[in-house]
Amino acid sequence: MKNNNSFLKSYKNLKVLVTGSTGFKGSWLSYWLFLSGSKVVGVGLKPEKDSIIFDSLKLKKKIKQYFIDIKDFYKINKIIKSEKPDIIFHLAAQSIVSTSFINPLETFGTNIIGSSNILESSRRNKIPNLVYITSDKCYLNLGKKDSFKESDLLGGLDNYSSSKASAELVFASYFDSYFKKQKRLSIGSARAGNVIGGGDFKKDRIVPDVIKSLKRKKNIVLRNPNATRPWQHVLEPLSGYLSLGKMLMNGELKSNIKPSWNFGPHKRNCKKVFSIVKLLTSEWGNSKVKILHKKSKKYHESKLLSLNINKANKELKWQPRLNLDETISFTTEWYKSYFSGEDIEDITNYQIEYFIDK
């Protein structure tokens, strides 16, 4: 199937509000929308020390940015009411598994209450379109070998997973209560796999931790090397979100279609953590760094996770574009450019253009 890039033209001159715009995925999405000619409104917390990509891409000069916490309904509602965006992409979240154990209330507050605030404000202000991003961790994962479909049970055996499942339940409740009777589908939830790529420096995420170890020439310590995950470059799910948003805006999806969508890689990209680390180490060019295993008893982590993407493929004509080698290469190239002091916009522009032409 030939990839369809028509979704990019749909966003030119539109006002697009992105929550989580200072984070890893949100920064990539905001920048891509800016390049596509959108009037981007960002909502998110002030960038932390490890949120380098927002500043590296000079997004504060390119988009209209509000630094607020989405848990504050009054503030987020005031912004949405005054900005009246054509579409909202909701990416804001507490996304670190280890943090969810250390600070569960912050996790549940942001991922459930904060997400509920976006839904309620969208409803009150009659925002015409909303793409609501959660996670592949929203599924009740009991170690099944089959890839998860959108119709599978939601649930979580840990704080992070249950917060994402709960966010999906709130979404489903709003859809059934307020949006289902519309002639067209106007809101959709999106679930992506393990997203990697340049610009992610968050602690306790596998790729940033590996990159930091390689840069410092220190041994890499893995807590769950045999866990299998659906690895994908950040541009993959973002293209899915944008494709979904375009079809929502154009009224191409009827309201009888279930509103949830998986955006994962091909099955061949579902690899064990250890395999991904070996590929990263090889691509980086540092064979002397050792890979060690230190099992953590603190966190519950599923051993197997993959997504069935047939629905997105059929209804949205969306499919992954990058193979695993390209994904790893893109990731290491971005970090090398950053550490070399190069203008990070150059490598980001190149990777977006390559992806579009793929």
Image: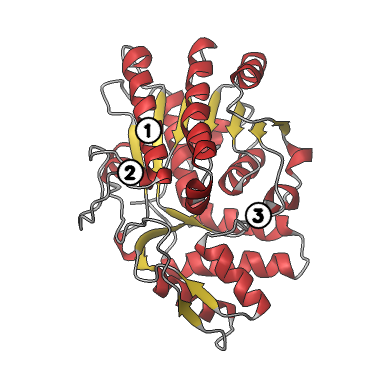
User: What element does badge 2 sit on?
Assistant: loop
* Foreground residue among 55 and 344: 55
Please tell me which of labels 3 and 1 falls first in the chain: 1
Residue 40 to residue 321: above or below? above
In the picture of the structure, the residue carrying the numbered disc 1 is: 166
Residue 78 to residue 187: above or below? above
Q: Are marks 2 and 1 in contact (CB under 8 Å)?
A: yes
Mark nearer the viewer, 2 or 3: 2
The amino acid type, in three-letter code, at marker 1 is: Ser
x, y percentage for residue 320?
39, 54
The amino acid type, in three-letter code, at marker 3 is: Asn
Q: Using the numbered discs, state the Cα–Cα distance from disc 3 to disc 1 in whole angstroms.
A: 36 Å
Going 36% across and 60% down the picture, which residue do you hit? 229
Please tell me which of labels 2 and 3 falls first in the chain: 2
Count of marks overlaid on the render: 3
Mark nearer the viewer, 3 or 1: 1
In the picture of the structure, the residue carrying the numbered disc 2 is: 156
Going 30% across and 36% down the picture, which residue do you hit? 315
Q: Using the numbered discs, state the Cα–Cα distance from disc 2 to disc 3 in whole angstroms.
A: 37 Å
x, y percentage for residue 348?
65, 56
Instruction: Residue 337: tell me if it is visible.
Output: yes
* Foreground residue among 47 and 302: 302
In the picture of the structure, the residue carrying the numbered disc 3 is: 349
Q: Using the numbered discs, state the Cα–Cα distance from disc 2 to disc 1 in whole angstroms.
A: 9 Å
Label 1 CA crowd tier, 10 Å (few <14, some 14–19, many 20+): many
Q: Quadrant of residue 32?
A: top right
x, y percentage for residue 256?
26, 22
Instruction: Residue 317: tell me if it is visible.
Output: no
Residue 178 is left or right of residue 141, and the answer is right
